[in-house]
Amino acid sequence: MIGIDIVSIERIEKNIQKYQEGFLNKFLCIDEINLVKTQKGFKISTIAGFWSAKEACSKALGVGICNELRFFDIQISKNFKNAPLLTLRKDKMQAFNISSIYTSISHDSGFAIAVVMIQTN
């Protein structure tokens, strides 16, 4: 199953300006917030990429962000080469019968895009 999402980085930036860290707290856990923090604040393009990755994951599963799959059920981290890793809570992995998740995130020209591929058992 494959999901894709694209978001305007400016849209994410406006939400951060308006709601500050409250916006981040609606879809990122503390570990994810720490990943997007820099010495000067937040890396907006990375935040937009994380938003896109979570949306793409929900689309790959065919449910969208809803009661069945919430933002906090999806966690983004980075591997030793700084590549994104996307995981789901153990109960969600079982509920959706997932064996593997692959993700790619990119940002350029004012947009962030993510693709998620999910393999099931």
Image (spheres, rainbow, N blue to C red):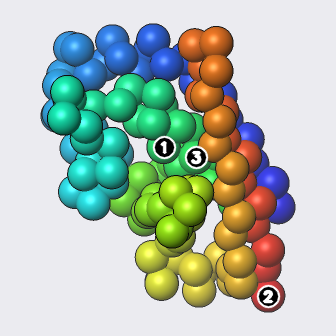
Spatial CA span between label 1 and label 2: 26 Å
Q: Are marks 1 and 3 in contact (CB under 8 Å)?
A: yes
The quadrant in which the N terminus is found is bottom right
* Residue type, numbered disc 2: Asn
Indicate the secondary structure of the residue bearing disc 2. loop
Q: Using the image, determine if residue 121 lies above or below residue 55.
A: below
The quadrant in which the C terminus is found is bottom right
Mark 2 residue crowding within 10 angstroms, few (<14) / some (14–19) / many (20+): few
Q: Residue 53, which numbered label?
A: 3
* Residue type, numbered disc 3: Ala
**22 lies left or right of 11:** left
**116 lies left or right of 76:** right
Indicate the secondary structure of the residue bearing disc 3. helix
Which badge, 3 or 2, comes first in the chain's sequence? 3
Q: Residue 50, which numbered label?
A: 1
Q: Position of residue 77 (x, y in %)?
A: 44, 62
